[in-house]
Image: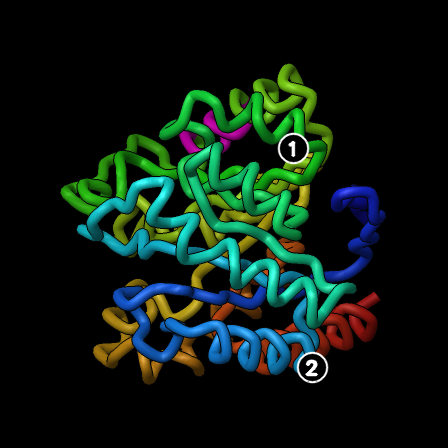
Amino acid sequence: MFTLNCNGRLLVINKPVVMGILNITPDSFYKGSRLQTEEEALQKAGSMLHDGATFLDVGGQSTRPGSVRLTANEEAERVLMIIETIKKNFPDSYISVDTYHAVVARQAVDAGACLVNDISGATMDADMLTTVGRLHVPYICMHIQGTPETMQENPHYDDVTREVLDFFIRQTEQCKLHNIHDVIIDPGFGFGKTHQHNFELLKNLSVFRMLEKPILAGISRKATIYKTLDITAAAALNGTTVLNTIAVLNGANILRVHDVKEAVQAITLVEKYNEASE
């Protein structure tokens, strides 16, 4: 069991939960996830909450391989009004902001977000940990090798599980030093990893339990699924459910997904399976 202090609200995670992806972008890798208007975002948020999402993760720029970076101001223009609108219409929702810009993290929390989801693990903005520590909100620390522009240019590890674990040991200590009490770790499937690296991390996910932090798995519709199966991201829901199920069996506490209902169903079935095997 884990507890998160989400801007003064205590959230107890005593079983795996789901984070729904809200991409306020024109260029995210999965076309079906792109939202460009306030109305679209609000409708999607409501649908995800109805289907059982615990968190809504709002992001303003694509971090797919080779994507072009936005400035903090450009990103803020996309997400802040959306976060405010969601919070106004769904005041009990837990909103996460997907950003590596410290200034956007601060503005998003002011707008109603209560978690910061940083794909860089604080390696792309030197002010991120100080900012999150002052905000007193949970921090999702993700591992990435390189940057979105370069991360898939021949990623290399001698031992991917050990090296990602070492990264988290260092960064969670830095979080502690910066007064961040609630840290969620995300191995960063697809971020500077080959398909084989991703499968190794998924197989060894339980190793990260030693950190005693909630584990987030974000593998929804990614290339490891659709390229392995020789399909498209649009056709990768079934493959996503399979790998989400494996992730939960191996210790994932949060599934970050495009398709909330199916992820909730997978968690329910795994929970029933675990009850039967005890």
**Residue at point 50%, 65% (across, down):** 21
Q: Is residue 19 visible?
A: yes
**Residue under numbered circle 1:** 211
Relative to 218, say whether 32 is above or below. Answer: below
Quadrant occupied by the C terminus: bottom right
Location of residue 141 in the rendering, given as x and y in whole percent from the top left corner = 53, 38
- Label 2 secondary element: helix
Identify the secondary structure beneath mark 1: helix
Of discs 1 and 2, which sits in the foreground? 2
In this view of the protein, can residue 207 be seen by the observer? no
Give the x, y percent position of residue 43.
56, 81
Give how far across and how far down residue 44 sits, in percent. 54, 78
Question: Quick check: is 168 in the magenta stretch?
Answer: yes
Residue shown at 44%/31% (left/top)? Answer: 162
Give the residue drawn at x 77%, y 61%. 15
What amino acid is labelled 2 in the image?
His
Indicate the quadrant where residue 133 lies. Answer: top right
Question: What residue did someone put label 2 on?
Answer: 50
Within 10 Å of disc 1 (Cα), the crowding (few <14, some 14-19, many 20+) is some
Residue range in magenta is: 163-169
Name above or below for residue 241 compared with residue 84.
Answer: below
Query: By what rule are the colours in the image chosen?
Result: rainbow
